[in-house]
């Protein structure tokens, strides 16, 4: 795991959370990641994760794209989402736009994984795929990979699992936390992938979270829903909602700590999960393909709809993103992006601050120390605060910059 | 002017239109472009254009951004838009987010230009500015520039005028056409600038069009409105609606050919204006900062709203744009962008063709000749055809690619 997981000033580590080093899932979970030949590089590309306890509870969120990957369709429709025990993932091929054959292949992955992991019931196995769109899955390799991975399932398999779900990721996104609750201490682990095609509607990418706490499926769903909204729903690498986003939380109860609804345990566990998800989301934005800097735009004003629209417009503006990349305090582009989001509403008296320096007040430039501002935007994390007329609404979006590496990575991905 | 103006297969030259070479405005129009010191490079940055006839009619369109440049606000509110005779433009500074002083400065430009050109009435002079946002205009330089430009006003000044309105443009966008109408032959000229911050709502950039035909302000407004919708409203470089977009059409009647409403003259003149505007718009997309290739996405289906949403999503997807740049037939990104635009409507049975090759039918990949497709997407202009369920609605968007040059240009623009 990352030496220091909670590294951002934007996501403070809750006091009752301890970061663990090394590898290892909560007791009762096992995982593996192997290379089965989908990725030409020979890197790991087939991952399995299983919870041995039959009473494991779970919750899940998926992309809401109008073009869904076969694994997403299958998992949404043919899984008992409240009792997912096994997860099978391949990287290197998204199994999207592959028609009836794609659905058959996703079902084969599910069936093979149910047998190989000993879970038995297909309805307890979720399937996820990520990678190139429109290419049939190499089922022979995948089936062999599932069998091989099943042999390697291990309580310490989270590192291999995390590696095998990645595609263009530049670094590992994995966390191991100990969470002190009033009723006892539980473990919370997570593995995520994602660096491009990132602007989730309410879930994104592939994110798998495990805990040895116990909770009802309703509690799992509530906690996952709230924390996804505050994390993966608030990031954008390139404004591109994926076809394959999947987030799954599993709880097996091995720690004998039950999370009752509306309890202090639930509150504290929720805080830990929230921090975990926000930091993971931030890592995805930071790993935005080729990203050098991360931006956070905070917009406040009188209308939920308008603050959201303005925050997204700024986070997705290629002009803002290239300025962030260039370490250029070009606040005119912030004004332009906000103006575009507020089409037909001129004149809007905008306030704009960058790293705490007010550059524009009520729509007009304000004197500021240009040298100091230029210095401030050379950091790794840059915050933009935007004020619209009115009060009561506020939102934030984390976003990556747009640089040469993004172009290099994306101009030549399939070939 | 460009050796061959109508160079794109997407905009055929109407039969009754002849391209003219060299310089020269329609009789009765004069223009000039000088360097007054706004651009550090010493390039031309102050432009004047005047129609000597007091009975000149005109029509105009502006950006609908919520953050409007002072010149746009001033021109919209203090000009007689049906009788614009003079146009004063500076490049290098957009006079946006400059508060009350910015409005005062725009008014000073208008007043100085009214006197210097002999137009007299300020209400007959339009003002436009383009360049950096949030920096006060250097009024001393600008006033001197207006006086200098007035001395250079010439019937052949269109080339200098076109140069002086440009910012990051890589090439000239200027046209001179002869249009044969049933009632006689008229001249139609245009000068445009624009390469970035391009996704107009209904007008874009700076575009000035002159003719020696005569027409009522209502006819001018109708023709400009219709042709802007089919041209500058259908392009995107970076999805960024500008604060300063301005399009002005002026008609001085010097050719003694009157365009009557609903006449054959109006139809033919409209066709010529339409081709002119579409080709100019395409030149702006082609000049998309650092662009290598231009895409055209045509979407058909059963709903005006959905075809528009899908076309914009594809044209503005950085993943599609980097693939276009890379000459990569990555149609999965087309499917992904369409899916994102159709969030919550899965499964949508998409049809996708690239350069006439069907790669996806009813949502699933179709066998195609990958080598031939790869070859086809190496051209300068690439067409994407998307089919959604249903019939009766169709739209198109022209868009530039996203490459290293865009990043280079935009990562370091103010500094």
Image (cartoon, coloured by chain):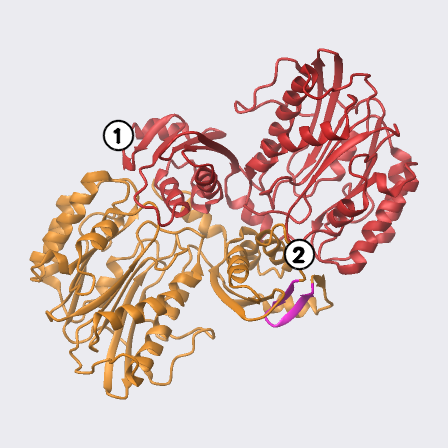
Chain colours: A orange, B red
Note whether A53 is above or below B119 in the view shown.
below
Q: Residue at x 67, y 28 (%)?
A: B223
Q: How many marks?
A: 2
Horizontal relation, residue B76 to residue B270: left or right: right
Picture coordinates of residue B161, whole percent (x, y): 78, 34
Could you tell me which secondary element the residue under label 1 belongs to? loop
Note whether A94 is above or below A328 in the view shown.
above
- Residue B263 lies in magenta, yes or no? no
Chain designation of label 2: B
Q: Give the farthest residue toward the bottom.
A: A182
Q: Nearer the viewer, residue A25 or B243?
A: B243
Region in magenta: A350-362
Picture coordinates of residue A39, whole percent (x, y): 25, 48
Mark 1 highlights which residue?
Answer: B367
Mark 2 to mark 1 CA distance (whole Å): 50 Å
From where the camera sits, is residue A45 visible?
no
In which image quadrant can residue B164 be found?
top right
Picture coordinates of residue B149, whole percent (x, y): 86, 38
Horizontal relation, residue A401 to residue B109: left or right: left
From where the camera sits, is residue B215 visible?
yes
Q: Earlier in the sequence, mark 2 or mark 1?
A: 1
Horizontal relation, residue B12 to residue B22: left or right: left
Q: Residue at x 26, y 73 (%)?
A: A219
Note whether B182 is above or below B323 in the view shown.
above
Mark 2 highlights which residue?
Answer: B415
- Residue A359 lies in magenta, yes or no? yes
């Amino acid at each position: 795991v990352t030496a220091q997981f909670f590294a951002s000033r934007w996501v403070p580590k809750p006091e009752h959370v301890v970061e663990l080093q090394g590898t290892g899932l909560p007791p009762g979970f096992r995982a593996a990641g192997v290379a089965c030949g989908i990725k030409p590089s020979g890197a790991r590309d087939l991952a399995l994760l299983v919870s041995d306890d039959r009473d494991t509870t779970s919750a899940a969120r998926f992309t809401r794209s109008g073009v869904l990957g076969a694994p997403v369709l299958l998992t949404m429709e043919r899984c008992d989402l409240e009792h997912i025990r096994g997860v099978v993932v391949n990287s290197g091929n998204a199994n999207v736009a592959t028609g009836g054959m794609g659905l058959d292949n996703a079902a084969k992955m599910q069936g093979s994984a149910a047998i190989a992991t000993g879970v038995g019931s297909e309805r307890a196995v979720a399937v996820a795929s990520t990678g190139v769109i429109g290419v049939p899955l190499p089922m022979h390799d995948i089936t062999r990979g599932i069998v091989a991975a099943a042999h390697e399932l291990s309580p310490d398999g989270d590192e291999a699992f995390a590696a095998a779900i990645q595609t263009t990721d530049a670094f590992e996104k994995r966390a191991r936390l100990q969470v002190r609750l009033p009723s006892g201490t539980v473990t919370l682990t997570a593995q995520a992938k994602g660096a491009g095609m990132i602007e989730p509607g309410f879930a994104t990418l592939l994110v798998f979270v495990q805990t040895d706490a116990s909770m009802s499926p309703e509690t799992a769903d509530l906690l996952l829903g709230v924390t996804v909204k505050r994390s993966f729903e608030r990031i954008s690498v390139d404004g591109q909602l994926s076809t394959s986003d999947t987030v799954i939380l599993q709880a097996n109860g091995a720690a004998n700590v039950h999370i009752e609804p509306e309890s202090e345990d639930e509150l504290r566990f929720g805080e830990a999960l929230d921090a975990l998800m926000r930091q993971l989301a931030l890592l995805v934005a930071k790993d935005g393909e080729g990203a050098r800097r991360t931006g956070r735009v905070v917009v406040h004003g009188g209308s939920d709809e308008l603050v959201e629209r303005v925050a997204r417009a700024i986070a997705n503006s290629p002009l803002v993103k290239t300025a962030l990349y260039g370490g250029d305090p070009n606040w005119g582009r912030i004004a332009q992006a906000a103006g575009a989001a507020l089409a037909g509403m001129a004149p809007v008296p905008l306030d704009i601050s960058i790293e705490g320096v007010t550059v524009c007040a009520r729509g007009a430039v304000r004197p500021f120390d240009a040298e100091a501002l230029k210095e401030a935007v050379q950091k790794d994390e840059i915050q933009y605060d935007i004020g619209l007329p009115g009060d009561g609404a506020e939102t934030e979006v984390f976003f990556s910059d747009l640089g040469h590496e993004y172009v290099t990575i994306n101009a030549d991905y399939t070939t």
